[in-house]
Amino acid sequence: MAKGVLVDLTKCVGCGSCTVACKLWNDLKWDPQNPTVGDKVKLNDKNWTVVGRHEVKDKDGTPVWRFVKQQCFHCKEPACASACFAKAFQKTKEGPVIYYPHLCVGCRYCMVACPFNIPKYQWEKTFPLVTKCQMCSTRVAKGEAPACVSVCPAGVFKYGDREALLKEAKSIVAKDPKYVNHIFGEQEVGGTSWLYLSDIPFEQLGFKTNVTHRPLPSFTEKYMQATPYVAITWGAILTGLYHYTKRRNQIAKENNKNIKA
Amino acid sequence: MAANAQKWSFRITPIRIFLMLLSLLCVGVIVFRLVTGLGMVTNLSDEWPWGLWIGFDVLCGVALAGGGYGTALIVHVLHKEYFSPIARSAMLTSLLGYLLVMAGLFLDIGQWFNFWRPFVSWGHTSVLFEVFWCVSCYTTVQILEFTEILTERVGTKYHALAVKALPVLMIIGIIFPTLHQSSLGGLYLLMVDKLYPLWWSPIIFFFFLLSSFFVGPAMICVETTLAGKAYDHWIPIPVLRKLIRISGYAMIVYLVLKVFDLVNRGVFNLMFKGNLEGNMFLIELVLGIIVPIIICFSGFSNSRAGLFTFGLLVSGGVVLNRMNVVITGMIRSTGVSYVPSLWEFAVSAGLVAMGILAYCFIVENFKILDHDGHGHAA
Ligand code: SF4
Ligand code: SF4
């Protein structure tokens, strides 16, 4: 029953309402140097979501504008959560991947681990925290859509059960040839809660398309599971070697004595 | 014991004054950083959450301090007493190395008062969790191991106890580093789409483990040469030569495995592309692995100069490897490059300076260098 959001990039008009809703709901400061809409937008500790403008060419070669909303993708198996050694990132069963500030140590491994570079840091604070979109987890828990989704005037988003949304997305792509045959988020890093449809290939819109389709935590799972066994076996081998070589040296010494005597 | 009558001594030389000034500067920057946060002192950013402190102070520090566990394995577990003249100084370097790593880590974490959190909030899926536990436990074990040396001079009545505990500590003290040397590489398993393929590998953890093992004897060569000059105490060449042979064989295994891994993943040719990554990788592999292997098995290693060159090349190679993983290999995926700030360099240099000073003090006041494994009074 994990929730998700389906984003249809062909419908976005770049008004930025979603970014405003995000700031209001999450009580985030305005950042005059880093606007949330435009050509050079960047996620940061105050901008949990931004809408970037891209000048691209459509299938017929006509220049067009496309607007791309960015935020955390809320991976099905999030690298950030598997990377955190203090459990400060946790995936909820409703879908959102939440950050618990009181558990965070500030090692920033989550930032290095996230394949999409989503978590951001409060660099200018003395005791900085990691920040990122939480998919309005308290709203989602109550059955409501995230703030950004609920305000969109252009009907870009559809909020609901992820698997149902995926099915719908597939049928949209199959029916309407204007879309590229790729649902971003279906398979990337094992699947994400946010799914994207587009009529322009995703790599032209700044999406990271060359990511693995394997869930990232699976890269470390086996390694971590093997650890205790390796530790115990290695310990046993070392102890054995310790006694064996000690005894061997003793015997060698005694033999030497005998020879000398 | 004769040693007890001796006063604490610490010679003051111009170099040491310089090192003290560096340490002082470092302490100043550290205090400033702890009070103001990371933004003003470092060049770290959202694109570069990990920089020089993690790369050099932690990853290199841990690898270079790996000499301790390798030597412990050879001398105390395999009972190759032939090598015992180097055991104590190798372990001392290792202990100091780890203390500095802990300092570096502490500096780098944003919520430093929260550092104990993973002890209670178990993020056990994280490789970092393993690194954290192993590094903290191992540092503790090393401090306990050191009590054997300490109690020869201070608190002598505990000496017998310390000696008795040593074998157990030694074994634990080999398990932990084995685990976390590989885990440091394991941290990068998650960066499959971010770290340049010349470095990312499904067995990166094994490369880290192996290189931390063979860099041990290399560090010992560097260290004994420097200590030899400073204290006129020379470890016999044959002992060192035999020791680096162990490195040499490990490096051959490393080289073969590396080539096999690159070919297997179809990225072998990337190293000849002439781009930054390819060139850095070649430097690392040729100067840090291939040339030292040749030195190791040629007559050159029969001289002090040869041993020292070997030591410098291998240690340099491992440092370069770690920095390549943390910085060079990540430039492409972040799209921005990172140059550490002056303050970051100052802290790294200062930490090393403190380590050297502590090493000198301990060597001058405890039985480290002229210890021959039979425990007679110096
Ligand atoms: S996109 Fe990044 S931050 Fe968001 S859930 Fe996935 S790994 Fe975590
Ligand atoms: S910075 Fe905080 S949330 Fe991120 S991995 Fe470290 S402890 Fe976890």
Image (spheres, coloured by chain):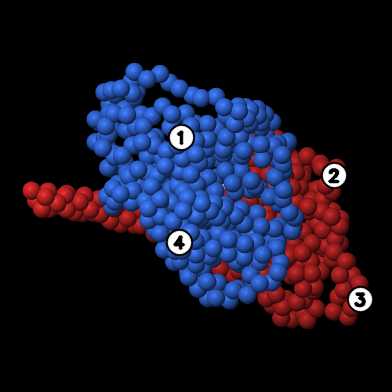
Chain colours: A red, B blue
Q: For mark 4, what is the residue?
A: B299
| Label 1 C-beta lies within 8 Å of the nearest ligand 2 atom | no
Under circle 4, the secondary element is helix
B177 sits left or right of B349 in the view: left
Q: Is residue A34 above or below residue B34?
A: below
Residue at the image point whose x is 67% and y is 64% from the top: B279
The earlier-in-sequence mark between 4 and 1 is 1
Can you name the residue that lies furthest to the right here? A62
What distance separates the C-alpha of mark 4 from that of mark 3?
A: 70 Å
Under circle 3, the secondary element is loop
- Amino acid under disc 4: Gly
Q: For mark 2, what is the residue?
A: A33
Q: For mark 3, what is the residue?
A: A62
What distance separates the C-alpha of mark 3 from that of mark 2?
A: 32 Å
- x and y percentages locating residue A30 in the rendered image: 81, 41
Q: Are marks 3 and 2 on the same chain?
A: yes
Q: Are marks 4 and 1 on the same chain?
A: yes
**Subunit under mark 3:** A
- Amino acid under disc 2: Gln
Mark 4 surroundings within 10 Å by alpha-carbon count, few (fewer than 14), some (14 through 19), many (20 or more): few
Mark 2 surroundings within 10 Å by alpha-carbon count, few (fewer than 14), some (14 through 19), many (20 or more): few
Q: For mark 1, what is the residue?
A: B231
